[in-house]
Amino acid sequence: MNAVPRAQAAPAGSRLAALNAWVDEVAALTRPDRVHWCDGSDEEYASLVAGMLADGTLVELDQATHPGCYLHRSDPDDVARVEHLTFVCSRERDDAGPNNHWMAPEQAHARMDALFEGCMRGRTLYVVPYCMGPIDSPLARCGVEITDSPYVVANMRLMTRMGADALARIERDGAQGRPFVRGLHSIGELDPDRRFIMHFPEELAIKSYGSGYGGNALLGKKCHALRIASWQARQEGWLAEHMLILGLEDPQGATHYIAAAFPSACGKTNLAMLIPPESYRERGWKVWTVGDDICWMHPGQDGRLWAINPEAGYFGVAPGTSARTNPNALAMIQRDTIYTNVAVTEDNQPWWEGLDKRVPALDWRGRPFDPANGPAAHPNARFTVSARQCPSWSPRAEDPNGVPISAIVFGGRRSTVMPLVFEARDWAHGVRVGAAMGSETTAAATGTVGVMRRDPMAMKPFCGYHFGDYFAHWLSFDRPGAKLPKIFHVNWFRKDEDGRFLWPGFGENMRVLEWIVGRVEGAADAVDSPIGLLPAPHMLDLDGLDVSAETMRQLLYVDAEELASGSGWAADLPPPSQH
Ligand code: O2Y
Ligand code: MN
């Protein structure tokens, strides 16, 4: 084989022989014109952006109103994660479980390597060292993504700790025998028929071909931090979860950290960045954002669960984000943000449905906007932005020891049956509550609206192993000496008989969070019900809120028969009282 040029820019290669050997091996297979080791510097980012502006991968947005903001229009056939093409390739089929597509590792490698053969001819191979979690955290884990997409590199720089510091940590880890996750990615021909996302958990490896979009291509996110990490976490005794992390500071200055799992399209980013109602702000309540999507929780010496957000940025859904739903998010994406598949206004500002009353000039495909073509922004249009730009960003997101979790919250979009909030009786009951999670689909997620989709712990697309083993792993945390968080379930989406939402949601969800931390502190009362513990009468602070007593009754109503029949909650499981 011909020699492939090693690095073109500093740092040229690594002190870790295993990493150099893998890069050489991949370069020999994929035949790039150039190899570039990413250092994560501002200069490197600027040069990547300049290259993408020159070849049309990025379009500059109005730099006066949105400095440092760019628009990427993806291939119209490459606009979302592809669950049907995502595989867990464990040696034993049973280890992947019925919740994953499975392929034997040898077969999967052969299939992928045939696709990768020569695929980077004429392109640059980027070596992207990244760290998931604060660089010096014992809870963090590292990976290297090899990709031929400068758009992926730029996004990885916003979403992870990427570059020279990560490489140094990978080398330190390597010297102590701790491996890095190997992620190989090529956009290939962007052909949906030649697209696969393969995970090899026993080898700590990922191979992704044929997509340049989000979860398919930014391998640190769903592939590493959830599918591979959940497998690793089971082996090492921790939890890698699809959860936001927020800190709730009370008027006395004490902060409780809450981890919350919701399926896609249930407002995780909005909850993570919640701004409390004015009456709460006046009293000194604050919400701090640690993470909006992924949470790694490790049992600490003190028996509590300590959590980090492995990510350093947000890859949030743009449509629906507005001054009403999430003012913090809107503020953070005014600068230094990559937008993907949004529309633009006549004066070249990013726009999406729900933002404001302006009209779009070009839709997400760059065509003059015509309502007959559908929405102006793609429903899965995204912004990528550094987490530090969020006005509610918590400096504790950089704490190498993480934050102690006081409460875990599960939730879903349920128009009936599920009350606004309830508390599980104990850890085992809470695990069962998470395992029974479900959510009604929205137009953004699928073609069919309002269909109940079971999504245990919001991990259905992301658990890298058998769900039976996963639930057993969760149950194993309840052991002597453990000081586990209390577990709750919330439902912001219950409707009345006319189909109107009963609860105002957004910032008003603060009232439910207050009851949750009140329960953690032993200061708030609850009453028993067939589903779990509900807020005792008058325990939710409704001051200043226009919600009638009858509406509250409906929001907290629990019907034992409805639960046990047809609701999907308990029809096929023993009732909670038997646990
Ligand atoms: O469609 C994609 O590739 C993005 S999916 C995503 C992105 C950010 C956070 N969560 C999700 C998700 O599907 O849960
Ligand atoms: Mn997610």
Image: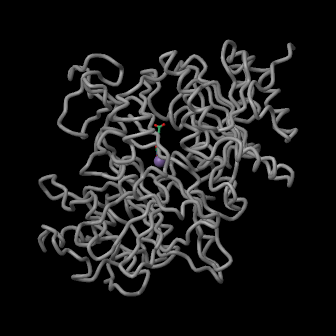
Q: Is residue 166 placed above or below 66 in the rendered structure? A: below
Q: The N terminus lies in which quarter of the figure?
A: top right
Q: Residue 324, can we see it?
A: yes
Instruction: Pinpoint residue 286: horizontal percent, then vertical percent.
Output: 36, 69
Q: How is the image coloured?
A: one colour
Instruction: Pinpoint residue 30: horizontal percent, then vertical percent.
Output: 73, 20
Describe residue 70's horizontal placement relative to residue 534 as left or right: right
Q: Is residue 81 placed above or below 560 in the rendered structure? A: above
Q: Residue 456, can we see it?
A: no
Q: Is residue 409 placed above or below 319 in the rendered structure? A: below
* 347 or 274: nearer the viewer: 347
What number of labels is visible? 0
* Quadrant hosting residue 295: bottom right
Instruction: Pinpoint residue 462: horizontal percent, then vertical percent.
Output: 55, 47
* 24 or 454: nearer the viewer: 24
* 569 or 130: nearer the viewer: 130
Q: Residue at x 24, y 40 (%)?
A: 354
* Quadrant hosting residue 160: top right
Q: Residue at x 34, y 45 (%)?
A: 441
Describe residue 310's horizontal placement relative to residue 206 as left or right: left
Instruction: Pinpoint residue 561: horizontal percent, then vertical percent.
Output: 28, 69
Describe residue 498's horizontal placement relative to residue 19 as left or right: left
Q: Is residue 397 placed above or below 265 in the rendered structure? A: below
